[in-house]
Amino acid sequence: MPAYNPSETEPKWQSHWDDADVFTADDHSPKPKFYALEMFPYPSGRIHMGHVRNYAMGDVVARYKRAQGFEVLHPMGWDAFGMPAENAAIETGGHPKDWTYANIEQMRAPMKRLGFALDWTREFATCDVSYYTEQQRIFLKFWEKGLVYSKTAKVNWDPVDNTVLANEQVIDGKGWRSGATVEQRDMQQWFFKITDYAEELLEGLETLDRWPEKVRTMQSNWIGKSEGLQMRFEAATDSDADIEVFTTRPDTLFGASFVALSPDHPLTKQLAETRPELDAFRADCAKIGTSEEAIAQAPKLGIDTGLRVTHPFTGETLPVWVANFVLMGYGTGAIFACPAHDQRDLDFARKYGLPVLPVVTPEGDDFTVEDEAYTGPGTIFNSTAPIPVAGRDTFSLDGLEIDQAKAAAIAMIEELGLGEGTIQYRLRDWGVSRQRYWGCPIPVIHCDSCGAVPVPEDQLPVELPYDHIDLTIPGNPLDRHPTFKQVACPKCGGEAERETDTLDTFGDSSWYYARFAGPNGSPFDKAAASAWLPVDQYVGGVEHAVLHLLYSRFFTRGLRDCGLLDLPAGEPFAGLFTQGMVTHATYDIGDQEWVVPAEVTEKDGALIHMPTGKIVTKGDVIKMSKSKKNVVDPNDIIETYGADVARWFVLSDSPPERDVEWSEDGVRGAWNFQKKVWRIVEQTDVPDHSPTASDPKATGDALALRRSAHKALEKITAGIEAFRFNTSVAQIYELTNALSKYDGQDAVRMEALGILIRSIAPFMPHLSEECWSALGGEGLVATAPWPQLDNAMLVEDEVTLPIQVNGKRRGEITVPAGLSKDDIEAAALSEPNIVRTLDGQTVRKVIVVPGRIVNIVAQ
Ligand code: ANZ
Ligand code: ZN
């Protein structure tokens, strides 16, 4: 037989799979369904090792489930709208659409070459008109259902590029591209009402028991439910004002040392009208980004308004400040500050010399706070009212635990008629307007007399124009397009203007998994989507823990409530796995000048950069990235070693959730393993048996091999089921070793090989097919059932038990497993060493612990 040659065999089997249409999912199959999905790629132009690992993992599941008898849907598409296409257009002078579709062509080839078991008939790109037409329809349905609204909101405005920037694109207060100081502008924006589902999204997390705990925690923190108190601090005098605050720590009320307003609070704005210093302060605050992180990181800034309010329990007056760390979008946009127990408040109080009074103590009552606020558990102290409260002579929280004190404080504020216990969510509505060309046009028309009017369904799609798109001019090309904007109002027929904003591309990926359920090109189909959903196994990066995975959970609920989906549980992804990254060593020749790892060699204990002869130092092992020059191109690996080796390597070396470090040795190991399997097949010559053979009467070495094969099969299967592919791989190695030591040319050899070959298939599908056909296996492994486990082969047939006489080990017996206690006892008592030891003594008691030990008490 010729040497194994992946560059020949791999394309050959891929076309066999295509010809037999193996991976096209049948919507009408009577089999149970299984939907396997990996987060679809952005068509950047190149696939990277991270993609290979991600899709290889999904492929293991898809192929395994098919072998287990499921009808598997395993589709692939492209998350194709977004900024990089616009940037490329700016750099190269091309068109985002051409760039995107050319990239898709370029990436599809290596993905096909990797032999993934994908249903390519359902492929689409989110920038296909047919896809975004559906998205516009969903937008209109959401609108009808009250899940879409517009309001004026603050945005980061780049005055040079004339565009809104995402928070991530504002770096140190400057536009990432223009370098211009970013301004805060109020602009009309479209929002999805995700907050309507805050509670449901939170509760749903409880049902997602096949999601990583950390992702659920991250979502739960993001939704950020907090039970608290909304209360009013009353004006101290007539010239002051009442102030509503929201707090989650009413237990710390006695430690309040000031009240603080957001710079954007209506009262602040009102005061600023007559107070230039406040107006200037507001302008300063506006220079910090709008994101919570930006505000949290900015130095604490404040200004005393001169207003005073009264503390409800102590009757003392508290000053009212404006503070830049108070956000307008959360709670009431005003707080009471307790510096001893909140770090932001403490930093602020220290800066402006405001009092710090601890009211929670973790130890005794001697407790002071220096530079670090105490936020842990403890007992309340310093919290007795000096005056009667609500007609009661004494009101005190002293001695209570935090939770008790919260309840007591809330009850008292309610009794005083100053407020109520409330529930707040950190989650905000999802702002989806982007002043960008390369996205899904928002289907809205603005009319001076009718306001914002939805585009009637029969006028969809609102298609992106291809011509007159020059992205080198700042601003949104749709805004200056000669015809896109001008349109008649659908309501009154008057002159109106199209919305020129496009949808956040996270919208595109919020429902693509449902779109895959229908055949490609057909519109979104309620019945088809409902039949395939939820996705049974989703695989992707943990970086999407919040945004994409939360938006998708919102969308399925929205689709359900608009009658577009039957999905009672509402959850789109029943199982989620977040895989680790592919990392690689980095090397630099000084001053962070990175060199390609493959150009580094070791000479006399030193690392040398071969092309320059310079000494290099090894840096960290990190995620592959162009700037660090530690990228390995999957195309090169496929070219040199083939797809199976690339797949095997990324699956074999580490647990799937951990990072895997790329190494030449590792890849060569995978290559050698492939050769080893092929060699065993080459050395097999059993013409009268197929790889589904078996010999139930096998004994000796043959029986031992049968045992090894079935034990390995059991563990390989368990490893795949539990997403521990590396343990499956280890078992595959064991079985391969057992087989390479076996010289019998018989049915048992074929049985063990059949098990090996079929259980390799999810990992190295091409090698598997080639071996199967070489051994005369029937049909394709890709459509073959998973090997049948023979449970009888899992039981150990013999066990060796130590025998103790009066606590000392005196001998051992080997008996058939499952032998009765009486028989074990008889065997132990007749063992020659024991007979000698017992000579003349009387046996008082024999204790048999089956499978472990025999204890004899004698006198
Ligand atoms: C008094 C207090 C005392 C607070 C204390 C904390 C500790 P979470 O838990 O994240 O919901 N807060 C309320 N509204 C705010 C706003 N618009 N901008 C900035 N901070 C705001 O946070 C709730 C806590 O954050 C609230 O409880 C409030 O400060 C602050 F020892 O009230 B707290
Ligand atoms: Zn009109």
Image (cartoon, rainbow, N blue to C red):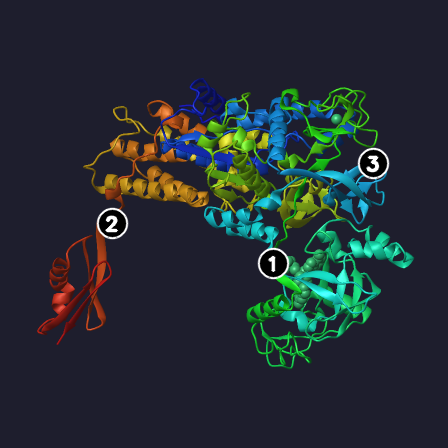
Residue type beneath disc 1 = Thr
**Which element type, helix, strand or loop, lies under badge 3?**
loop
Q: Nearer the viewer, mark 2 or mark 3?
A: 3
**What is the crowding at mark 2: few (fewer than 14 residues within 10 Å), some, or many (at least 20)?**
few
- Quarter occupied by the C terminus: bottom left
Q: CA distance from mark 3 to mark 1?
A: 43 Å
Image position of 482 (left or right of 25): right
Residue drawn at the location 77% of the way across and 55% of the way down: 265
Q: CA distance from mark 2 to mark 3?
A: 73 Å
Image position of 237 (left or right of 822): right
Query: Which corner quadrant of the figure contains ligand 2?
Result: top right
How far across and down, in percent of the image, does residue 92 sit?
78, 26
Q: Using the image, tell me which numbered label, if any, was put on residue 702.
A: none
Q: Quadrant of residue 790?
A: top left
The reply to whether dot 2 and dot 3 touch (C-beta < 8 Å) is no
Residue drawn at the location 44% of the way across and 36% of the way down: 61
Q: Using the image, tell me which numbered label, if any, was put on residue 422.
A: 1
Residue type beneath disc 2 = Glu
Q: CA distance from mark 2 to mark 1?
A: 62 Å
Quickly name the residue at label 2.
796
Q: Residue 349, relative to residue 285: is it above or below?
A: below
**Which element type, helix, strand or loop, lies under badge 1?**
strand
Q: Using the image, tell me which numbered label, if any, was put on residue 161.
A: 3
N-terminal of the pair, mark 3 or mark 1, is 3
Question: Toward the viewer: 389 or 144?
Answer: 389
Question: Toward the viewer: 99 or 344?
Answer: 344
